[in-house]
Image (spheres, rainbow, N blue to C red):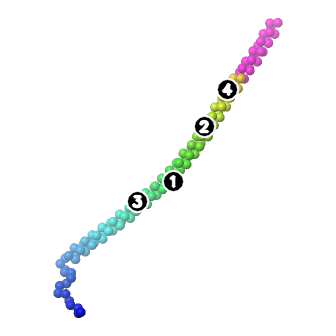
Amino acid sequence: MSYVPLKQPLLEDDGSFDYEETLLSERNEQAKHLAEDIYHLKGAMDDLKMMVDEQGEMLIQADNNVTTADLEVELGVEELEKAYIYKSRSKKRIIIMVVVILLILAVVIGASIKFFIK
């Protein structure tokens, strides 16, 4: 088989090459813009991930604070119950002391009246 040159060239210089070059150039620019957009989207997603992680840490801290507050409230309730008991006991003691003082005064006054009446 021998080489036979073509009578007509494969690509004709009728300006279609410029059109194809323009199309390729536009597609190349679109691809660059798409790559830039994807890069910016990746940055936004990274920022979003960082914010979600920070908020997760804040939620964990808030949960720990709620747990601590719950324990502190329980301890406070116990202390208030003790204070109520002490207050009740204190009232009883004061009443008993007042009754005892009144009895002592009654005895002293009664003895003084008997002493003066004689």
Identity, as a three-letter code, of the amino acid under mark 1: Glu
Q: Is residue 104 magenta?
A: yes
The residue under label 2 is 77
Give the vertical position of 63 relative to 17 (above or below): above
The residue under label 3 is 44
Q: Earlier in the sequence, mark 4 or mark 2?
A: 2
Which quadrant is the N terminus positioned in? bottom left
| Marks 1 and 2, how far apart at CA | 30 Å
Span colored in magenta: 97-118
Give the vertical position of 98 relative to 79 (above or below): above
Q: Is residue 103 magenta?
A: yes
| CB atoms of marks 3 and 2 within 8 Å | no
Spot the residue most to the right: 118
Q: Position of residue 70 (x, y in %)?
A: 57, 43
The residue under label 4 is 91
Secondary-structure class at tag 3: helix
Secondary-structure class at tag 1: helix
Identity, as a three-letter code, of the amino acid under mark 2: Val
Q: Which mark is residue 57?
A: 1
